[in-house]
Image (cartoon, helix red, strand yellow):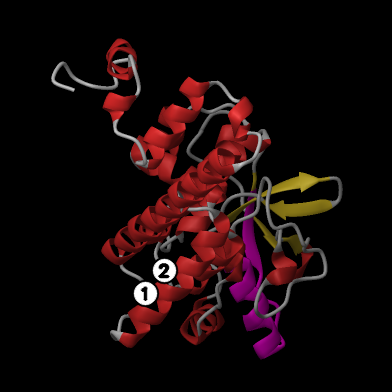
Amino acid sequence: MSSNDKNRFTAYQFDPFELCIIGGTHCPEGGGPLDTDAVDGPGYDARVLQPITESDVLDVIDQGILQPIIIRKNGRTLKVVWAGRNRVRRARLATKRTGKTVMVPCVFHDGTDHDFLKKQIAENSHRSEDHFANQAIKAQGLRKYGDSDEQIAVTMKCTEAAVRNYFKYFELDQSVQDAMKQGDITGSAAIKLVELTREEQATELASLVKKAKANGHAKVKVAAAAQGAKKRAGKAEEGTKKWGLRAIGKVIAHEKAEELPEGFVLGMRWVMGDLPSEKIKGLKAILKDLFLVDEEG
């Protein structure tokens, strides 16, 4: 870049197989010789897992790569740091198809990993639809650098409520996360399951997916997930209450129960519904002091 003209920059041409895509070994078509197998951290973007279309390859064969990508030199390695992973992939496929190297225009850029992550999000946000899980990973990456929810929302061009929802992704069972990536349930629907235990999430997910397919829906809808989670949580709470009552019953029936303070035993019998409150002297007064009953009892 000329020191006299900040709008000018120099683009260098590189063979696409000389460039390193972070996580590129997981690409559907296979990675390049310098690609890494990292699936998180600075420079990784889950969209490298998306297939390249035939029309994209044909376009590159016809026109080449027209827009420069951004790279950073790390020793002798040239890493694609925030823009251009899929352009490199298309150039590789076009090169294999034709036997003629499709060169990739590149611009060198310096900065911290934090800078690159923020630029990666800004650069790629409008290029192709990003799935919920990938957005969640990016939000988590920004938080690791100390960004607040407000700062993350600005960078990711979303609301703070959306950012909080992204972090709920990490509270989901692996089966739910996998279902999101496979397209069986949307991110908005999946986070409705967060209040359940991971085991309950997996069970409810299976039920929801089955019902959705039976009704001809490609994905689980938000309303269905919310209703299913609420219903299952209610059953779990009811089960907990029943377990608690059974436990109290066993305590009362135990041979050593007579050694317990009389007031304690009477209180448990009242909780069980075996004894009216009038039989426990001073109970209403105690509950009023604790604001557990109104003036009328």
Q: Residue 205, which numbered label?
A: none
Other-residue count near label 2 (Cα within 10 Å), few / some / many at <14 / 14–19 / ≥20: many
Q: Kindly check if marks 1 and 2 are in contact, taking CB atoms under 8 A apart as contact.
A: yes
Q: Where 265 falls versus 164 (above or below)? A: above
Q: Where 132 falls versus 168 (above or below)? A: below
Task: Work out whether residue 204 can be spotted.
Answer: yes
Circle 1 residue: 219
Mark 1 vs 2, N-terminal side: 2
Q: Residue at x 53, y 54 (%)?
A: 172
Circle 2 residue: 185
Which element type, helix, strand or loop, lies under badge 1?
Answer: loop
Q: Residue at x 35, y 39 (%)?
A: 161
Q: Which residues are magenta?
A: 87-107
Which element type, helix, strand or loop, lies under badge 2?
Answer: loop
Q: Residue at x 43, y 74 (%)?
A: 207
Q: Residue furthest right?
A: 76
Other-residue count near label 1 (Cα within 10 Å), few / some / many at <14 / 14–19 / ≥20: some
